[in-house]
Image: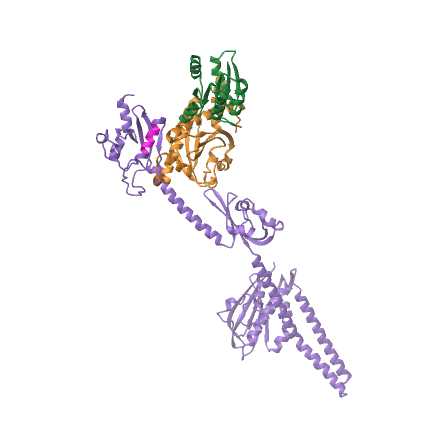
């Protein structure tokens, strides 16, 4: 198994690409939701897939109940986008969409979270795809309700050996909406990512 | 001309410098800062003619740095180059006194446009 | 590609295709939809889709179409959440799970200027039927699992299930017996590590019989246990079930039983000694007081005196011998020795002599011509015989009339030496004859019987001497008289 190492320049470049990609996604969302979001600086981490469950649980507040939805993307770079959002935040998004309190139920919230995930995921990856010049396509997103990190499917650990996590927070402070965006990809994609990054760096 | 480029990403700064090199002259001086705090300090120190500022930065965000710089010099020429392209963001920086907004990634065309516009003023 | 070709593709595709604008007016409706909804293209084109499908949630559809157009991305209806968009009744009759076709929908921008999108409708019914059935099965399996767990936790044995030599399951009793709180910790401890070092040589992975060992709890405390291993194969998986039974309590009970038996044996022995000594002591007393009397009245002669003293000496020698016999007998045999059965029986009878004579019981002994010798524990045979003979003499004593006999017959049969003891005591009632070898079983009053005599005999003969003892009632003749009584048959293996 190749040790995935990004050197300083490569890491910086990827960071910047993610910044742009997430910026694009946030803009898309805030247009739909009609609110202002604070963008946070994307974090890039590379971990062993066995640690994934533990790692993801760090994003979760033990007291809250979460929706976790994921959307797969395919191409030379493949993986999935995960969007973690607690129930209260998703309810607040629903209000932003103009829903009344009595219209809000699990089903409605699930649909909204899926929409948001789709928007975020499509925008992020599309931007990356165009910046890196690598064609990528999507599958429809899927959703689950998580009560603890243990609910996260253990199958993750068999699919991937090393997992690259690129995460950022989505924060609509005024509306009390907080979510976590993660891109998970594998060691196979890192080769394509490295290639694309180096192509970009060369142009500079 | 003294130019200040502030962005926490080295690559982003490189991209700005690269596109700048196509329009700038050898006499132009370029200063670099990595966060909002440095942006303000370097502005105080060198009083650059043109500032390129990112919005998402540690220590101090671009929004705050912009406000601080305008406070120091109300006619400071600050151009925001950011990934944060929400309309609200764009409106906010315009209101704070930024003279332009470039969506990342910057390229030569966009940079040329900026300089052309500046030269006209 | 010209219009005809694309129309052909759209109309032969196995999905629904709708061209619709943001006001929900339909611009294209493909054949797949025509067939399933029975709404023709002509009927619906130019009209509002909501008029035909009023159950569609308008706000949701509007949101999705708008997002798609605004951001130029695909948006989706997820079957799990939405079930279906277009209401299409299913015609399935057997195995019907859903009433309506389960659908997923993809909405992509078609013409942003004209604000039109394409909606692709996919039939996911089969997939979701499978899912539904799967979930149903899963639930059943979960329930079965729970039942099994209930069963497993109800037993008094620790149970470990190994799949391919890795411990997959253990029950609550296992945690309890070994004093573990963490299930995984115990699962990862190999059985060998739980066995006391003194007994490790008895255990190896492939043993198939039950073994008795000492095992170690987490606290370090050890206890006696029975381990049983069952190996099977299932679907290319090697399955092994290990059960561990804590026999500490059983062993304690056993110990008590064995001690009680010993005490009982001792008690019986003392009673026998008392019997043995009564008559000789009486004799000594009689002779001594006789001598004294004769001396007092001056008729004592030297020869009378000598005879008297000699008799007393003989009797004391005899008493001394009985002490030796009993001392010998009380020492448990540690090694087997070769001995003659008839001689052993004669010695035994001599120990009971006093008692039998007083009670007027006649012993008739018959044996084969040849001397029958075996290699075994002689003292244990004596002890066993004493118990049986005691039982026999009590039985005949209970008869008020008729002669009292105990018949002892020694013979060879196949590869066994046999000792048959018959009495004329009318036999053992059928209702209890199956129970007489049970410990604590007695028909006597509590003060008189411990119920351990025949139990001890059984243990001695079968466990220690590796023989067998059986009892049955028999009707038989002796000297033209008919008698009925219990017949004990002891078989002991002949050495080669």
Chain painted in purple in the figure: C
Picture coordinates of residue C176 (x, y %)? 54, 52
User: Observer-nearest residue: C144 or A103?
Assistant: A103
Q: Is C406 on the left-hand or right-hand side of C430? A: right
Taking the spot 56% from the left edge, 51% from the top edge, the residue there is C178
Main SS category, magenta section: helix
The span shown in magenta is C60-68
C306 falls in the magenta region: no
Tell me where residue A108 appears, x and y as whole percent. Answer: 36, 38
Q: Which chain is green?
A: B
Q: Is residue C45 left or right of residue B7?
A: left
Name the quadrant of the C terminus of chain B. top left
Res. C122 visible in picture: no
Residue at image location 62% in from the left, 49% down from the top: C197
Q: Residue furthest toward the left?
A: C43
In front of the other: C359 or A21: A21
Is A189 rendered above or below residue A84?
Answer: above
Q: Residue placed farthest to the top in the image?
A: B26
Q: Nearer the viewer, residue A94 or A43?
A: A94
Residue C40 position in % (x across, y down) = 22, 32
Q: Is residue B69 visible?
A: yes
**Is C68 or A26 nearer to us in this picture?**
A26
Question: How was this image coloured?
Answer: by chain
Total marks drawn?
A: 0
Letter of the chain in orange: A
Q: Relative to A1, does residue C464 appear above or below in the rendering?
A: below
Q: Is residue C299 above or below residue C14?
A: below
């Amino acid at each position: 198994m190749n040790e995935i190492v990004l050197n300083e320049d490569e890491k910086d470049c990827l960071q910047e690409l993610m910044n742009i990609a997430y910026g694009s996604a946030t803009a898309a969302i805030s247009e739909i939701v009609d609110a202002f979001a604070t963008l946070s600086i994307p974090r890039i981490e590379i971990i062993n897939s066995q640690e994934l469950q533990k790692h993801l649980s760090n994003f979760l507040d033990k007291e809250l109940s979460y929706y976790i939805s994921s959307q797969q993307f395919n191409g030379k770079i493949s993986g999935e986008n995960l969007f973690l959002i607690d129930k209260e935040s998703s309810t607040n998004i629903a209000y932003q969409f103009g829903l009344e309190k009595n219209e809000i139920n699990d089903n409605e919230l699930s649909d909204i979270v899926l929409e948001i995930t789709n928007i975020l995921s499509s925008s992020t990856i599309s931007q990356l795809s165009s910046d890196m010049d690598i064609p990528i396509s999507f599958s429809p997103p899927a959703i689950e309700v998580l009560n603890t990190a243990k609910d996260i499917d253990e199958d993750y650990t068999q699919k991937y050996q090393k997992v690259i996590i690129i995460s950022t927070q989505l924060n609509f402070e005024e509306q009390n909406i907080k979510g976590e965006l993660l891109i998970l990809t594998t060691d196979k994609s890192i080769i394509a990512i490295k290639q694309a990054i180096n192509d970009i760096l060369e142009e500079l | 001309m003294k130019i200040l480029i502030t962005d926490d990403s080295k690559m982003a700064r490189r991209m700005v410098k690269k596109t700048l090199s196509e329009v700038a002259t050898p006499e132009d001086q370029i200063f670099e800062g990595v966060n909002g705090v440095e942006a303000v300090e370097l502005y105080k120190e060198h009083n650059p003619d043109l500032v390129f500022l990112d919005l998402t930065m540690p220590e101090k965000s671009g929004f705050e740095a912009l406000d601080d710089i305008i406070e120091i010099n109300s006619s400071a020429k600050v151009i925001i180059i950011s990934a944060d392209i929400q309309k609200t963001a764009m409106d906010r920086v315009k209101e704070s006194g930024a003279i332009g907004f470039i969506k990342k990634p910057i390229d030569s065309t966009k940079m040329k446009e900026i300089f052309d516009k500046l030269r006209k003023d | 590609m010209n219009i005809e070709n694309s129309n052909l593709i759209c109309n032969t595709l196995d999905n629904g295709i709708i061209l619709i604008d943001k006001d929900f007016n339909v611009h294209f409706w493909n054949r797949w939809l025509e067939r399933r909804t029975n709404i023709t293209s002509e009927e619906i084109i130019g009209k509002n889709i909501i008029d035909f499908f009023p159950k569609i949630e308008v706000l949701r559809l509007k949101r999705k179409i708008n997002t798609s157009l605004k951001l130029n991305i695909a948006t989706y209806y997820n079957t799990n959440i939405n079930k279906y968009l277009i209401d299409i009744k299913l015609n399935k009759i057997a195995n019907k799970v859903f009433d309506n076709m389960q659908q997923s929908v993809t909405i992509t921008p078609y013409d942003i200027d004209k604000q039109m999108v394409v909606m692709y409708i996919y039939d996911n019914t089969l997939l979701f039927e499978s899912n539904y059935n799967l979930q149903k099965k899963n639930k059943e399996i979960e329930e079965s699992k729970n039942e099994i767990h209930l069963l497993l936790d109800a037993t008094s044995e620790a149970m470990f299930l190994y799949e391919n030599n890795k411990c997959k399951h253990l029950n609550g009793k296992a945690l309890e017996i070994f004093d573990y709180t963490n299930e995984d910790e115990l699962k990862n401890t190999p059985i060998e590590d739980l066995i006391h070092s003194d007994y490790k040589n008895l255990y190896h992975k492939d043993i198939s019989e039950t073994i008795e060992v000492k095992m170690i709890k987490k606290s370090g405390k050890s206890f006696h246990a029975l381990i049983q291993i069952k190996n099977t194969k299932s679907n290319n998986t090697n399955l092994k079930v290990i059960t561990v039974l804590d026999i500490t309590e059983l062993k304690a009970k056993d110990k008590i039983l064995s001690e009680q038996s010993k005490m009982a044996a001792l008690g019986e022995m003392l009673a026998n000694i008392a019997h043995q000594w009564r008559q000789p002591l009486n004799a000594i007393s009689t002779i001594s007081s006789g001598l004294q009397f004769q001396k007092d009245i001056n008729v004592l002669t030297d020869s009378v005196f000598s005879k008297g003293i000699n008799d007393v000496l003989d009797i004391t020698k005899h008493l001394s011998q009985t002490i030796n016999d009993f001392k010998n007998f009380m020492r448990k045999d540690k090694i087997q020795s070769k001995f003659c059965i008839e001689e052993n029986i004669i010695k035994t009878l001599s120990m009971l002599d006093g008692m039998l004579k007083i009670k007027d019981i006649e012993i008739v002994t018959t044996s084969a011509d040849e001397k029958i010798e075996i290699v075994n524990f002689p003292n244990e045979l004596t002890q066993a015989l004493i118990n049986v003979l005691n039982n026999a003499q009590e039985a005949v004593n209970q008869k008020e009339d008729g002669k009292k006999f105990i018949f002892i017959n020694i013979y060879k049969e196949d590869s066994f030496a046999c000792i048959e003891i018959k009495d004329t005591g009318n036999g053992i009632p059928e209702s209890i004859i199956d129970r007489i070898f049970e410990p604590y079983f007695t028909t006597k009053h509590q003060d008189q019987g411990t119920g351990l005599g025949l139990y001890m005999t059984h243990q001695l003969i079968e466990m220690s001497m590796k023989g067998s003892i059986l009892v049955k009632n028999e009707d038989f003749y002796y000297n033209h008289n008919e008698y009925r009584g219990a017949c004990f048959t002891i078989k002991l293996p002949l050495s080669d």
